[in-house]
Amino acid sequence: MSSRRDEGISFRLSEQQRMVQATAAHFVDREIIPRIAELDRSHTLDLGIVRGMAERGMLGAAIPEEYGGQGLDFVSTALICEEIERGDGGFRTLLSVHLGLNSLTLLRFGEEEQKRRYLVPQARGEKIACFGLTEPGAGSDVASLASTARRDGRRYILNGQKTWISYANVADHFLVFAKTDPQAGHRGISAFLLDRSMPGIETRDIEHKLGVWAGSTGEIFMTDVEVPEENRLGREGEGFKIAMYALDMGRFTVAAGAVGTIRAALDASVKYANQRTAFGKPIGKYQFIQEMIAEM
């Protein structure tokens, strides 16, 4: 039997990945952390920070260069999400929705013309995109969607309501899901690309949230919205499959963000332990406090 060890997978970051991480960290330290406490207290979304993320290519990180993106790998994208969440979860949520749920899904299922019309400006950060799946009566149970898309010749008429939609109130583009066959359960769901300029679309902010106060959360109301057939994403009845793919694209960014959250908590704990004194010395000198921080 050979004694040669299997080299396995290297977890070392490449030079490019380290550069991406450093760029994102510098942006967070300079643009988000100094302002986030006040933004959180005042429940204010700072679109200047969003523009800064766009200017640095973050909104199109994992999108190929041919569609206006940076062409980065998923590890680099995760590193960006980790650093952004270290500053604030609301701006990482923007990445998860705009890039993960919407743009990467459009990259996978979109026709070439759809990619040119929607994906390119999203990847460049010229347009903000959101993802409309959750409804007042349907969340994890996607088959219970009540929104409908009735075919009328070469167009669809969409009616329904979406809720808890991150960045709905500032989005230019919407990826929404509605039933083209209400009797077919999850097999009757289709996906559509909508523009804010389409008549019949209204959005409202959701207020009095328990958190993510510096981010944007809202509702989408669709009243007889006329959507051209060419704005359907994928085939009719393929919406459930598309939604499940989209959720997978979003989840890895959420997981990466969670690492940023615990890093921020650890940094704050160490800082406090070194500043707070008790019985004549910083509490970080006491073994019990050291053990608590070590467990983090």
Image: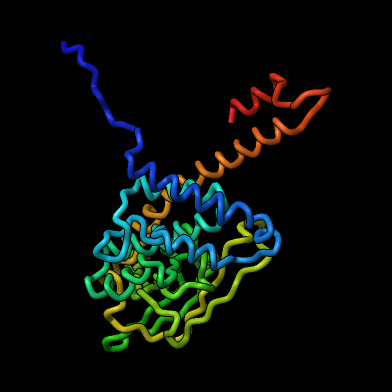
Look at the image and tell me whether residue 169 can be seen. yes
Is 167 situated left or right of 119 in this image? right
Q: Nearer the viewer, residue 78 or 30?
A: 30
The residue located at (72%, 21%) in the rendering is 286
The residue located at (44%, 70%) in the rendering is 128
Q: Position of residue 38 (x, y in %)?
A: 68, 59
Q: Position of residue 97 (x, y in %)?
A: 44, 61
Relative to 56, does residue 183 appear above or below in the rendering?
Answer: below
The residue located at (35%, 74%) in the rendering is 192
Q: How many marks?
A: 0
Q: Nearer the viewer, residue 117 or 225?
A: 117
Q: Residue furthest right?
A: 279
Q: Position of residue 91 (x, y in %)?
A: 52, 58
Relative to 98, does residue 195 appear above or below in the rendering?
Answer: below
Look at the image and tell me whether residue 141 can be seen. no
Q: Residue furthest left?
A: 1
Relative to 143, does residue 28 appear above or below in the rendering?
Answer: above
Is 60 situated left or right of 209 in this image? left
The residue located at (61%, 61%) in the rendering is 214
Locate the N terminus and report the quarter of the image it occupies.
top left
Q: Quadrant of residue 224?
A: bottom left
Locate the C terminus and report the quarter of the image it occupies.
top right
Q: Nearer the viewer, residue 79 or 203?
A: 79
